[in-house]
């Protein structure tokens, strides 16, 4: 990051060398003197659009003002940032460093250009500087290209609507649903689990999405699964099914298949249910 304290100190030094007040400098820039004061205290940085004018008024270079050479900043000011990125190996750190003084649209355009060559995981530190729509587009682009590495990094910055949409569209693909399930609506995850269960039974449900399935839908899945195979294969979903529902099915399972039916799910039934069964059966 640029050193705001250094830039503020340099700005104040150059202004005083010109025997100019903060108000006079602000008037020349068409901004409030409070903005100039904030810069000089190191609380904020001048907008990139103000740097050339600021450097000219104070008779210093932009590099002197920033305390280092900043070719990316120079290219943005010159309006040829895309060419600069094409011709140079610009790092994410360079963009992050420049982001606080660039307009959001400039940062987003640069990030979009870089995404043509880099995966989401390589751009992860940039996401906080990007708008929701841009993150949505980067996310969709990665999914379309089946470049899934890093989708969990951008997911917190993607709209829930987009995540829901992508998940429903990719139920039958190799898309790693579990990586972003926590960012989707629980009912959407429930719908996905239901489809997986209908296609291949309980074992077909992705284990990673179990904690995020809507309880009501999971209870429905448990009911349907029990009708077909009793409590067989229930050990995966037992920790996530509503306790009352699990006990209800356990009681039916014992009636249907004997006490061995609950052997795999006994730890999730609770002492009260097990004690009640023992009392009723043996005491």
Image (cartoon, helix red, strand yellow):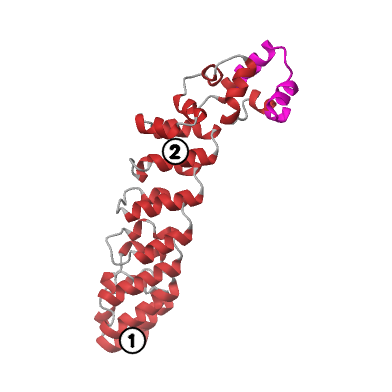
Q: Where is residue 18 in the image (x, y as percent from the top left)?
A: 69, 12
Residue 157, above or below 69: below
Q: Can residue 263 be seen in this view?
A: no
User: In x, y percent, where is residue 78?
Assistant: 50, 28
Q: Name the residue under label 2.
A: 110
Residue plotted at (42% across, 59% down): 182
Q: Residue at x 38, y 39 (%)?
A: 114
Image location (x, y in percent) of residue 237: 33, 70
Q: Which mark is residue 27?
A: none
Q: In this view, does 246 lie above or below 124?
A: below
Q: Position of residue 191 (x, y in %)?
A: 39, 72
In which quadrant will I find the C terminus?
A: bottom left
**Dominant secondary structure of the magenta stretch?**
helix
Q: Let me know if residue 62 appears in the view.
A: yes
Reply yes or no: does residue 160 show up in magenta. Answer: no
Name the one closer to the observer, 154 or 52.
52
Q: In which quarter of the image is residue 236?
A: bottom left
Q: Is residue 213 left or right of residue 202?
A: right
The mark nearer the N terminus, 2 or 1, is: 2
């Amino acid at each position: 990051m640029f050193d705001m304290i250094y830039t503020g100190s340099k700005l104040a030094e150059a202004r005083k060398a010109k025997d100019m007040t903060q108000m006079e400098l602000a008037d020349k820039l068409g901004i409030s003197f409070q903005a100039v004061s904030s810069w000089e205290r190191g609380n904020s940085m001048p907008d990139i659009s103000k740097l050339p004018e600021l450097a000219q008024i104070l008779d210093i270079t932009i590099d002197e003002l920033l305390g280092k050479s900043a070719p990316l900043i120079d290219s943005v000011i010159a309006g040829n940032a895309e060419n600069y990125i094409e011709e140079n190996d610009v790092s994410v750190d360079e963009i992050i460093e420049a982001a606080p003084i660039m307009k959001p649209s400039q940062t987003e355009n640069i990030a979009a250009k870089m995404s043509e060559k880099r995966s989401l995981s390589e751009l992860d530190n940039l996401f906080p500087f990007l708008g929701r729509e841009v993150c949505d587009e980067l996310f969709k682009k990665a999914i379309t290209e089946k470049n899934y590495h890093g989708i969990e990094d951008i997911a917190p910055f993607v709209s829930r609507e987009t995540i829901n949409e992508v998940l429903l569209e990719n139920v039958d693909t190799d898309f790693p649903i579990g990586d972003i399930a926590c960012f989707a609506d629980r009912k959407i995850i429930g719908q996905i689990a239901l489809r997986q269960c209908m296609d291949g039974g309980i074992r077909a449900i992705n284990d990673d999405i179990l904690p995020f399935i809507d309880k009501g839908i999971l209870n429905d899945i448990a009911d349907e699964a029990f009708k077909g195979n009793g409590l067989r294969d229930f050990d995966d979903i037992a920790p996530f099914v509503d306790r009352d529902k699990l006990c209800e099915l356990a009681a039916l399972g014992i009636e249907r298949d004997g006490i061995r039916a609950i052997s795999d799910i006994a730890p999730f039934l609770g002492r009260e249910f097990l004690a009640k069964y023992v009392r009723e059966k043996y005491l």
